[in-house]
Image (cartoon, grey):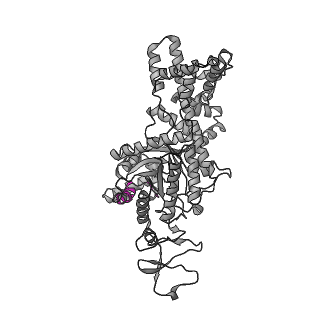
Amino acid sequence: MSYSKDIDALASVVGANASWNAINPESAVRMRLQNRFQTGLDVAKYNAKIMRDDMAAYDADTAKYTQSLGCWHGFIGQQKMIAIKKHFGSTERRYLYLSGWMVAALRSEFGPLPDQSMHEKTTVASLIEELYTFLRQADAWELNHLFRDLDAARAKGDKAAEKDLISKIENHQTHVVPIIADIDAGFGNAEATYLMAKQMIEAGACCIQIENQVSDEKQCGHQDGKVTVPHADFLAKINAVRYAFLELGVDDGVIVARTDSLGAGLTKQIAVTNEPGDLGDQYNAFLDGEYIDSADQINNGDVVVKSNGKLLKPKRLQSGLFCFKEGSGIDRVVLDCITSLQNGADLLWIETEKPHVGQIAEMVNRIREVVPNAKLVYNNSPSFNWTLNFRQQVFDAWQTAGKDVSAYDRAKLMSADYDETDLGIEADKLTASFQRDAAREAGIFHHLITLPTYHTAALSTDNLAKGYFGAEGMLAYVKGVQRQEIRQGIATVKHQDMAGSNIGDDHKEYFAGDAALKAGGKDNTMGQFENV
């Protein structure tokens, strides 16, 4: 992109229309740059390539794993990307995650709901669109500051600054990054999955995550009562998502196949099987029950299937659900993952009950015996007690190695008394290196936290309320919020500017020239935050 050439090209267009003499080509070019992506499909196509390139980079070097944080509002997603650019200078390998859990808990018109796919289907696509609206506004906001600085440099005759600012404009990195979007279990049958996937892609999604639970029995991955479906049902939904991508021209769209089998002990259906050893037969082989020898052992309402050349009477609950064998979860996960990757999925998501590199690696190594480049998206979930889990891991490792652990009570490792001990410090080191270790040893391409801002919003609000409604009064806000914004250079301290006031002022000037009534004059109190 050449800023000057773009201005010259548009000047030719404007000059060819005599009645457009009030139009400033440079102003129009600026508006174009601030609106780089016109549609959600533009966003999806742009970001699908980024994800594919990042996946290839990870295959070559596992240190190049990717990360994201979950968000439930466009402003939250916007501020994350602004913060990333501020602290690290680049959004490279950093995404956003759209959590179905947070949509249910925070965005449903029914009010707060558990993660059971009871919220409105359209809410997810609406949030994707909202997120990208805010991310595009972040581009416009950042470029607006560059444009204003450019005008100031020109006014001073500072050619070096002018050249530097034009280079920054031409090489501006967008805040528009990939979003991994949660479609739950598809909110219905394969056709419903396809329709919802289309909405999500049209809103900008380049990556859709789908899980192998039953739609109408869906549970949060970290709660009990999870019910999975036979592979044929799940693969039909993966196909539905792929068809949605292809129909809309996002040929390299990414599908994440999530398995909840590790913690799911139930199935709603017995799989269809046509011959011994086929996929349905493999699924049914995990059913708990008893083998029978005669029809006399069949009670009214019992179901009997042929498995391993014998008659199996599966264990069925009063709910009509069938049980899997105890201890079969890992084997089912491995079969789920291999099957998904061999039938259209690009990435895997294994929902676990704890953050343990060894446990994840055990499953991934088995998967990679069949699919060598298998890669995971992993949920660094707030549902885990990270402090307790890693302290227990250190305790157990030390005990196994014969190290004296008598100073520690394993049942009370969460205690603050252990924060500054050797064990507590070592556990924190493992927590800090977990993502690097898991990317290297367990095939995790993408690390995400599903619900971070649900918790940060609650924590920061609690701290502010405690002080503001208590003895500190207004000092609680001033010291705990505004002063920190100023000291740390948080852009929202100038909230009028962050919301687009300066952009609007510039547009008014483009449209009306000296007659523009602008908000950013001397009486705008945002001036109190200049040069602080």
Location of the C terminus (image quadrant): top right
Task: Give the magenta part as a residue range.
Answer: 352-366
Q: 380 or 343, which lies in front? A: 343
**Residue furthest top in the image:** 157
| Vertical arrangement, residue 26 with respect to residue 81, above or below | above
Residue at the farthest left position: 402
Q: Position of residue 376 (x, y in %)?
A: 42, 52
Q: Is residue 503 left or right of residue 262?
A: right
Q: Name the image quarter holding residue 406.
A: bottom left
Q: Does residue 530 appear in the picture of this structure?
A: no
Percent across and percent down for residue 340 are 44, 59
Residue displayed at 46% across by 17% down: 161
Using residue 336 as the reference point, say whether residue 186 is left or right of it. Answer: right
What x and y, as percent, mark residue 399?
A: 34, 58
Residue 506 visible from this viewpoint = yes
> Is residue 365 highlighted in magenta?
yes
Q: Main secondary structure of the magenta part?
A: helix
**In the rendered image, the vertical position of residue 449 relative to residue 325, given as above or below:** above
